[in-house]
Amino acid sequence: MGKAYPIFKRENLLYEREEKDECWTIIPKFHPETRELVINKTARKVLELCDGNKTIEEIEKEMNNLYPKVSRDVIERDVNETIGKFSRLLIIEWKGENPFLYRRKEDISNGFSLSIAQEDDILRIKEFMQKLTKDKKKEGLFYIRIPLFLFLITRRK
């Protein structure tokens, strides 16, 4: 896997507000059902470091410099959990491959296969489906949306 560079996408927020003690309240645009998230100053700093120019390892190193009394294991875990969660909420996008994205494809039967997609794949598939529905002649593609997952079933020709 190549290097992955997380990018904080402020435009993917419906709402943001400064709180006390450098905390922050946000509502993600693509997951408004999440409601308000209150982010502490450490998670906020991780988000701010996601500028598309630093790898996760470089962000961990910078956080180690900011919090020298915290063990490297704790910082590594916190950075990865923070980036992973915000990536699932589409607040973080990726330059390079998303290391938190799980992909799997299974052949079913009669030439059908099932793929499971998460995160930004859902937006790409939604855009594809909108284009597809304009051309009613297309056949053999079905999708089911369940919260946090999209199942895409295609028929091989």
Image: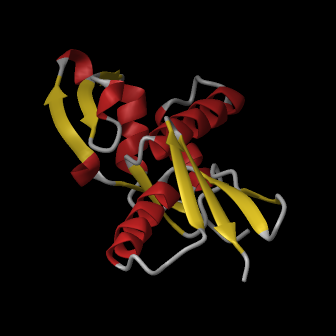
Please name the residue shown 58% across and 23% down the image. Answer: 69
Left or right of 142: which side holds 9? left
Left or right of 124: which side holds 61? right
Q: In which quarter of the image is residue 46?
A: top left
Q: Which of 15/5 is in front?
A: 15
Q: Quadrant of residue 28?
A: top left
Please name the residue shown 43% across and 71% down the image. Answer: 128
Q: Where is residue 41 in the image (x, y as percent from the top left)?
A: 34, 26
Q: Quadrant of the N terminus?
A: bottom right
Q: Position of residue 102 (x, y in %)?
A: 69, 51
Please name the residue shown 84% across and 61% down the image. Answer: 109
Q: Which of 4/122 is in front?
A: 122
Q: In which quarter of the image is the C terminus?
A: bottom right
Please name the residue shown 32% across and 75% down the image. Answer: 134
Left or right of 98: which side holds 20? left
Q: Where is residue 119 in the image (x, y as percent from the top left)?
A: 50, 50
